[in-house]
């Protein structure tokens, strides 16, 4: 993707972003928890589109409804109002869509399964023949440097290694749409940057449509084509930023570039306002 000229003009919040070949549409999405006096509005009239092959980061302070939106898009929880369309078709709670993969905040690997058995789990459930399954698992482990740990169990692995297992368990099923809920949030800085490198490398090959939840602006800038910024609770779409940084990206070198620093400073001003609102509650 070619870089676009950077401008210091304030981006204008968008209701629904006009994009060609839209895969995910979120339309006036609402979510409230509780009833009566105990009712809490978590998400309020949020709308955005994600185009085919686009990597979008959903950014905002804790409690702004990022993960709630992701879980509604995944069909894991019901929405209070609004619509979600996947390839133009409504997405409802409990609906299973094979084209969608989900990477959770915690690694969620099965402790009783080896690394190779964890990675191959989705293929096993899908009925993929054993020979093909072994070949695809071997390729997946090689891609993320885990070949030597194929027979190991999760208790013997580092946090970053377990997260690589969880990531490949999802990616091996070849989802076209990838939903990721702060998957690297619990990792130390060095391990997180290594996971960024791995994810960027894998995404450059397959170009899945990605919605990635994070509260880390540096992470969002490193990975995404666009950053959708939510306000403090109730979560509303505050701004929709393009990230005009050249691809392919080096997760470490990128952070040392003047353009990264300018973008970080520009977006941080708006994000910082929302952090301050959260602290004032």
Image: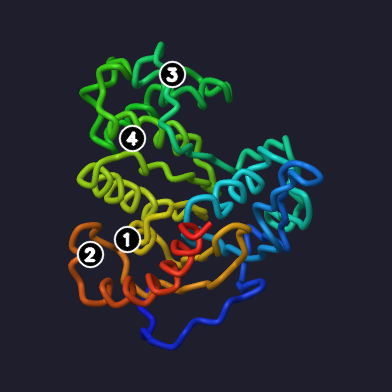
Residue 255: mark in rendering: 2
The residue nearer to you, when weighing 232 against 185, is 232
State the image coordinates of residue 261 (x, y, percent, origin top left): 26, 73
Pick the front one: 40 or 136: 40
Residue name at image x 43 percent, y 18 percent: 110
The residue under label 3 is 110
Disc assigned to residue 218: 1
Which of pointers 1 and 3 lies earlier in the amino acid sequence?
3
Please tell me how crowded label 4 is: few (under 14), some (14-19), or many (20+) other residues with Cα within 10 Å: many
The x, y position of residue 15, in whole percent, is: 66, 73
The image position of residue 248, as x and y in percent, is 30, 63
The answer to whether the residue labelled 1 contacts the one labelled 2, judged by CB atoms less than 8 Å apart, is yes
Badge 3: how crowded within 10 Å, few (<14), some, or many (20+)?
A: some
Read off the residue under disc 4. Answer: 164
Callout 2 touching callout 3 (CB < 8 Å): no
Q: CA distance from mark 4 to mark 3?
A: 13 Å
Q: Residue at x 28, y 45 (%)?
A: 192
Q: Residue 88, relative to residue 148: is it above or below?
A: below
- Quick check: 143 above or below 178? above
Question: Sequence-wise, which precedes: disc 2 or disc 4?
Answer: 4
């Amino acid at each position: 993707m070619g870089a676009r000229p950077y401008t210091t003009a304030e981006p204008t919040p968008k209701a629904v972003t006009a994009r060609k070949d839209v895969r995910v549409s979120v339309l006036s999405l609402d979510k409230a928890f509780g009833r009566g006096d105990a009712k809490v509005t978590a998400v309020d009239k949020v709308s955005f589109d994600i185009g085919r092959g686009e990597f979008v980061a959903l950014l905002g302070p804790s409690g702004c409804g990022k993960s709630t939106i992701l879980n509604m898009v995944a069909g894991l929880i019901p929405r209070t109002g609004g619509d979600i369309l996947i390839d133009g078709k409504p997405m409802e709670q409990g609906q299973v869509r094979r084209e969608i993969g989900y990477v959770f905040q915690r690694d969620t690997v099965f402790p009783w399964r080896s690394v190779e058995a964890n990675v191959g789990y989705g293929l096993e459930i899908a009925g993929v023949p054993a020979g093909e399954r072994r070949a695809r698992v071997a390729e997946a482990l090689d891609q993320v440097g885990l070949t030597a740990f194929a027979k190991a169990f999760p208790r013997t692995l580092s946090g970053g290694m377990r997260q690589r297992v969880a990531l490949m368990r999802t990616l091996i099923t070849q989802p076209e749409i990838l939903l990721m809920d702060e998957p690297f949030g619990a990792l130390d800085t060095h391990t997180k940057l290594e996971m960024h490198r791995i994810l960027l490398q894998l995404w450059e090959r397959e170009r899945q449509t990605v919605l990635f939840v994070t509260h880390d602006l540096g992470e969002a800038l490193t990975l995404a084509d666009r950053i959708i910024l939510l306000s403090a609770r109730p979560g509303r779409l505050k701004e929709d930023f393009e990230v005009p940084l050249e691809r392919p990206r080096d997760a470490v070198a990128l952070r040392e570039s003047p353009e990264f620093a300018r973008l970080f400073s520009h977006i941080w001003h708006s994000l910082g306002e929302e952090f301050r609102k959260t602290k004032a509650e």
